[in-house]
Amino acid sequence: MITGYCVKCKEKGVELSEAKIHQTKKGGFMAKGTHTDCGTTVCAMMSKDNAEKAIAEEAAEKAY
Ligand SMILES: [Zn+2]
């Protein structure tokens, strides 16, 4: 499960549904999904290790 900060709910650690891992221009990794409770898009910065782990565990889809 991937969690991030929801700007609408102003809540940390919300669960992202349908998370996809993107790679930023600077080579970082970012998970993008929607907050299950409110439907707002939530982004979470991730380390390469965590991004690859999330993909391996099928917690997120590879989108790069
Ligand atoms: Zn929310």
Image (cartoon, grey):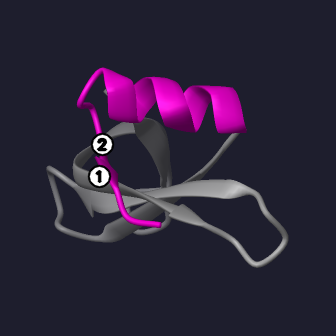
- State the residue at coordinates (38%, 65%): 63
Whether residue 30 is situated above or below residue 52 in the rendered picture:
below
Q: Residues within 10 Å of mark 2 (few under 14, many from 20)?
A: many
Query: Which residue does the image show at 84% across and 71% down from the upper left?
Result: 26
Which residue: 49% across, 66% down? 7
Q: Nearer the viewer, residue 25 or 15?
A: 25
Secondary structure found at label 1: strand
Left or right of 29, for residue 21: left
Query: Which quarter of the picture shows residue 46?
Result: top right
Is 52 magenta? The answer is: yes
Q: Mark 2 points at which residue?
A: 60
Q: Which amino acid does label 1 sit on?
A: Ala
- Using the image, tell me which numbered label, if any, was put on residue 19: 1
User: Percent from the top left, x then y, of residue 55?
Assistant: 36, 35
Q: Do the residues labelled 1 and 2 touch (CB within 8 Å)?
A: yes
Magenta extent: 48-64
Q: Is residue 3 above or below residue 38?
A: above
State whether residue 32 is above or below residue 53.
Answer: below
| Label 2, ligand 1: CB separation under 8 Å | no
- Could you tell me the amino acid type at mark 2? Ala
Mark 1 or mark 2, which has the lower sequence index? 1
Q: Which quarter of the image is occupied by the N terminus? A: top left
Q: Is residue 2 placed above or below 20 in the rendered structure? A: above
